[in-house]
Image: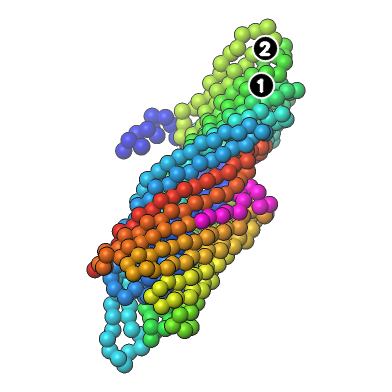
């Protein structure tokens, strides 16, 4: 009710789409490695192993490996540090969060009839926070060439001046709104003061350096609730299926500041500005998974799993504001404010994220331990926004196909048991989803952990470290300069398991 009241107080607009980007589609296409502490300690290499609540997220046949009913819950503490380099200036920022990472249960029903080859049926349900969006990135430095004026010019050119000056902000398209901000904030000027003018020039003085600061704070989550069923044939071949419900809640607040000390002009020009953007995306989706595990021998196992596309229905809410300072030669600074106090509420749309195929192998050393390898393939270029007849979606879908590519993910895990104590370790590599390999780079992760079996109760602890480099532009249109970011993520997870 408070949210509805707020919308009526501040005003709202409704339209089909705004400026979805390639990075938005990628955000909901990627999953971080989450789950139980045992799963994380072995870097998620469970496709041919099973017998762990989080193994269901890789291969749904894994629940049929359980011998007894089991329930568990996992808590995690995540710390992420982002080191930024923007034209030689080094900055850093970090964010720490504590969350419920996983909760689930598996119930196993045995058939003791010796004439029946289908020995058991397992039914499970598992919740996982597949992506924690809590993050903070700060970049600062002096750009010797480009100003944010290119952002507003890119949106404004082609827009008639009358659409900026005569339309109510709430009746404008997203493109017109960006032109409106540039014009009302005196960042750009029309070539002619004619209603039919469609070309604009910059009001930012050229010939010098531009000092920039960019703050990005994100919060929220992407989660998956899986309903699982699996069975085994002669305890040699296991089959399983998942029906997954996905929930996303993402908030992004960014503030971009620019200041220049270029020579003042006879007319008023921009000396500094601050451009604020807030995005709230929420919605849900569904997918399904199919999987199989085969015991080739008592020790050697193979696994194969397929996860379908995920079909999301998403909603976006966007608000923006711009504050500028203009000054003329010999004059006093003048502060300008462009804040419509409006939340743009957009119609729902569909995002289809790509499917994934996982090949797995494991070798079990009796009751002493195991070693496991998973290799997954996902074609990020297959992500797409719908309805595809929307002009904006056609453009971004083309960008997705041109910029994103097929990426492989390698996971290796090992476990060694010493009576009730288990020692674990793992490694994970994921290739860049971008064809250029730099917008978001390759991922490398190392993990380790231990567990203790008290009988009916088990306690597992895991630590994982992840590092990835990226260089995403501060804006996707016009002004696309960005900082080189090195992200380092440390995670500690604790799982409590109970056999029922």
Residue 356, image x, y percentages: 53, 65
Residue at the image position 61 percent from the left and 54 percent from the top: 442
198 vs 386, nearest the viewer: 386
Left or right, residue 200 beside residue 220? right
Residue 203 left/right relative to 42: right
- Say which residue appears at 33% left-offset and 78% top-offset: 121
Whether residue 443 appears in magenta in the rendering, the answer is yes
Q: How is the image coloured?
A: rainbow
Answer whether residue 410 is visible to the viewer in this image: yes
- Of residues 173 and 419, the one nearer the viewer is 419
Tag in front: 2 or 1:
1
The stretch drawn in magenta includes residue 486:
no
Point out the image quarter for the C terminus: bottom left
- Work out which quarter of the rendered image holds the N terminus and state it: top left
- Which residue is labeled 1 in the image? 260
- What SS does tag 1 mark? strand
Q: Which labelled disc corresponds to residue 382?
A: none
Q: Which residue is mark 2?
A: 328
Q: Quadrant of residue 154?
A: top right
Q: Which residue is nearer to you in this view: 470 or 369?
A: 369
Q: Residues within 10 Å of mark 1 (few under 14, many from 20)?
A: many
User: Is any part of residue 252 visible from this angle?
Assistant: no
Of all residues, the one furthest to the top in this rendering is 330
Mark 2 vs 1, N-terminal side = 1
Magenta residues span 436-446
The secondary structure type at the circle numbered 2 is loop
In three-dimensional space, the C-alpha distance between marks 2 and 1, rounded to whole angstroms, equals 14 Å
Residue 20 screen position, x and y as percent: 56, 45
Number of marks drawn: 2
Most prominent secondary structure in the magenta stretch? strand
Q: Please tell me in which quadrant of the rendered image residue 251 appears.
A: top left
């Amino acid at each position: 009710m408070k949210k509805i009241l707020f919308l009526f107080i501040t005003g709202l607009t409704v339209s089909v789409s705004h400026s979805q980007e390639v990075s938005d589609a990628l955000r909901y296409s990627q999953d971080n490695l989450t789950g139980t502490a045992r799963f994380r300690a072995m870097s998620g290499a469970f496709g041919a192993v099973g017998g762990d609540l989080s193994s269901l997220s890789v291969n749904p046949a894994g629940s049929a490996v359980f011998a007894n009913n089991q329930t568990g819950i996992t808590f995690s503490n995540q710390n992420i540090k982002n080191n930024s380099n923007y034209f030689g200036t080094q900055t850093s920022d970090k964010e720490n969060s504590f969350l419920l990472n996983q909760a689930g249960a598996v119930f196993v029903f045995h058939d003791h009839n010796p004439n029946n080859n289908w020995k058991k049926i397992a039914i499970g349900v598992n919740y996982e926070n597949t992506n924690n969006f809590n993050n903070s990135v700060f970049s600062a430095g002096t750009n010797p060439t480009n100003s944010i004026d290119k952002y507003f010019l890119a949106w404004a050119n082609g827009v008639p001046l009358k659409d900026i000056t005569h339309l109510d902000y709430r009746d404008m398209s997203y493109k017109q709104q960006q032109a409106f901000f540039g014009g009302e904030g005196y960042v750009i000027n029309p070539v002619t003061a004619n209603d039919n003018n469609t070309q604009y020039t910059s009001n930012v003085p050229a010939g010098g350096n531009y000092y920039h600061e960019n703050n990005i704070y994100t919060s929220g989550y992407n989660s998956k609730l899986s309903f699982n069923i699996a069975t085994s044939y002669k305890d040699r071949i296991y089959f399983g299926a998942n029906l997954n419900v996905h929930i996303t809640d993402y908030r992004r607040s960014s503030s971009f500041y620019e200041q220049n000390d270029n020579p003042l002009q006879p007319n008023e020009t921009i000396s500094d500005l601050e451009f604020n953007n807030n995005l709230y995306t929420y919605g849900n989706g569904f997918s399904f998974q199919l999987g199989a595990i085969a015991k080739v021998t008592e020790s050697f196992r193979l696994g194969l799993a397929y996860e379908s596309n995920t079909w999301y229905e998403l909603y976006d809410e966007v608000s923006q504001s711009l504050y500028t300072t203009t000054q003329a030669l010999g004059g006093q600074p003048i502060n300008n404010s462009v804040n419509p106090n409006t939340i743009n509420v957009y119609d729902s749309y569909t995002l289809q994220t790509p499917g994934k195929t996982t090949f797995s192998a494991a070798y079990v050393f009796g009751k002493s331990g195991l070693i496991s390898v998973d290799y997954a393939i996902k074609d990020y270029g297959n992500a797409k926004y719908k309805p595809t007849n929307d002009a904006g979606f056609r453009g971004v879908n083309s960008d997705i196909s041109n910029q994103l590519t097929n990426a492989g993910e390698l996971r290796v895990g090992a476990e060694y048991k010493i009576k009730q104590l288990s020692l674990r370790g793992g490694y994970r590599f994921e290739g860049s989803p971008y064809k250029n390999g730099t917008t978001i780079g390759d991922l490398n992760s190392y993990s380790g952990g231990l567990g203790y079996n008290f009988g009916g109760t088990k306690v597992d602890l895991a630590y994982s470290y992840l590092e990835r480099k990226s260089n995403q532009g501060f804006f996707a249109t016009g002004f696309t300069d960005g900082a080189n970011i090195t992200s380092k993520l440390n995670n500690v997870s604790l799982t409590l398991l109970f056999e029922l």
